[in-house]
Amino acid sequence: MRGAREKMESAGSGGEGGSSAPKGLKSGGNHHDWDNHHHRHYSGLAVRITVLFVTVGIIYVVLNQSAYPTKFLQNSFSFMSDQSIPSPAINKENDLENTLKRAAMKDNKTVIITTLNAAWTEPNSIFDLFLEGFRIGNQTENLLNHVVVVALDQKAYSRCLEVHHHCYALTTAGIDFSGEAHFMSEDYLKMMWRRIDFLRIVLELGYNFVFTDADVMWLRDPFQRFFPDGDFQIACDHYWYNYTDLENSPNGGFNYVKSNNRTIQFYKFWYAGKDYFPGKHDQDVLNMIKFDPFIKDIGLEIRFLDTAYFGGFCEPSKDLDLVITMHANCCIGLENKLHDIKMVIDDWKRYMSSRDRNLKTRSWTVPRICG
Ligand SMILES: *[C@@H]1O[C@H](CO)[C@@H](O)[C@H](O)[C@H]1NC(C)=O
Ligand SMILES: *[C@@H]1O[C@H](CO)[C@@H](O)[C@H](O)[C@H]1NC(C)=O
Ligand SMILES: *[C@@H]1O[C@H](CO)[C@@H](O)[C@H](O)[C@H]1NC(C)=O
Ligand SMILES: *[C@@H]1O[C@H](CO)[C@@H](O)[C@H](O)[C@H]1NC(C)=O
């Protein structure tokens, strides 16, 4: 999924929606007026969705006395997204529930999920570096037992089976995600939204997850750093304020989500933005809906993760003693990304092997080409 990063890049470096503007520039009215305009409409959307499903639900209950409306409400969303349709070439073992069960941490039903397409699973491409990150990280290698690779095409699936235990093929009838999905192309957008819809299914199956793009290097165990009381915790391109401040600039490439009614409702709401804001990708829509009263109403607790721990090329953490993950965001082009991720790996190896961890050995030499 080469395209995945291009999204973050533009989000990180760009002026869209003003989300990356420095703190001092944010007082201007434009940004907020524009946002409020959208919020009102989006609340209207929530009402319309509710009306639609209540109506459909009533019809269903009339037809089937024993059905429980809320159960129907959940099911009714499932048909919107065909769960994966295994093609004949895909292994019969391709069963989502089994895959999650095998990969989950036993104590708390938590999995780590990444999505990959053919372009990123070529040998010596992003996937190999992703796996290497876990191996060179401090006590992160065991986490690989909990990583589920969601392959978006047949080639990525076969390659996953060669090198990893938990592979799942998420194919979509009539769409080929194997090639380069150019930033904001139609296929790119479909791929991004497919991911949101898929993650909602994971939540409905009762699994908590950390979603990670494959160009995130896991160098320490993140679980101690997550907030105990957050439902939806997300890394940032830029961490401007504090961990609850919605003005932070989230990056959809790394998030920790607990499975509960609030998060399931939130993912449905988010996904509905696909049709409500045509041509926008999931991260843009997240920035629009994060202020929506709907979020408060359902009681969703959002937490933003500090770039001091969960950094990226947009805003690298300054102290390797603190780093947990390093994301190759703010980077356009696969070759550039590969180059700088290799530098991350070299920096980290140098840091881990140095006896004297002074200020110099505790900082990155990246980004070089990216950033
Ligand atoms: C879940 O359990 C694993 C051990 O199985 C532990 O390492 C991890 O920290 C736990 N995660 C949370 C969020 O409690
Ligand atoms: C690696 O993890 C161990 C155990 O948590 C810790 O004692 C050690 O200081 C860590 N090393 C670094 C470089 O963070
Ligand atoms: C975080 O920022 C928000 C909004 O500026 C503020 O209301 C809140 O008190 C702050 N929280 C903490 C923990 O500082
Ligand atoms: C959602 O709420 C219903 C009732 O309000 C409850 O029975 C159910 O266990 C909840 N589901 C989750 C995943 O928390």
Image (spheres, helix red, strand yellow):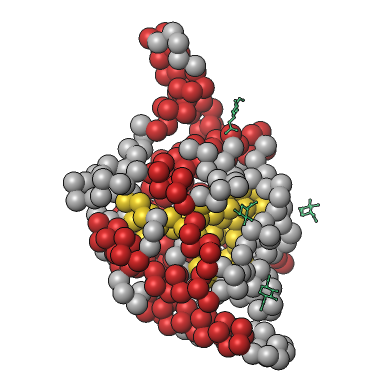
Rendering coords of residue 158 (x, y %) = 27, 60
Between 279 and 163, the one nearer to me in the picture: 163
Q: In this view, does 241 lie to the left or right of 83?
A: right
Residue at (25, 50) in percent of width and height: 91
Q: Is residue 145 above or below residue 218?
A: above
Rendering coords of residue 12 (x, y %) = 54, 67
Q: In this view, does 316 lie above or below 36?
A: below
Between 107 and 203, the one nearer to me in the picture: 107
* Residue 232 visible to the viewer: yes
| Image quarter of the N terminus | bottom left
Residue at (31, 60) in percent of width and height: 161
Residue at (58, 53) in percent of width and height: 256
Rendering coords of residue 14 (x, y %) = 52, 67
Q: In this view, does 115 lie to the left or right of 316?
A: left
Between 193 and 360, the one nearer to me in the picture: 360
Q: Which quadrant of the view contains residue 291? A: top right
* Residue 184 visible to the viewer: no
Residue at (71, 57) in percent of width and height: 243
Q: How many labels does the image show?
A: 0
Q: Which quadrant of the view contains residue 210? A: bottom right
Which residue is outermost to the left? 88
Q: Is residue 357 left or right of residue 312?
A: right
Rendering coords of residue 327 (x, y %) = 53, 70
Q: Is residue 262 above or below residue 189?
A: above
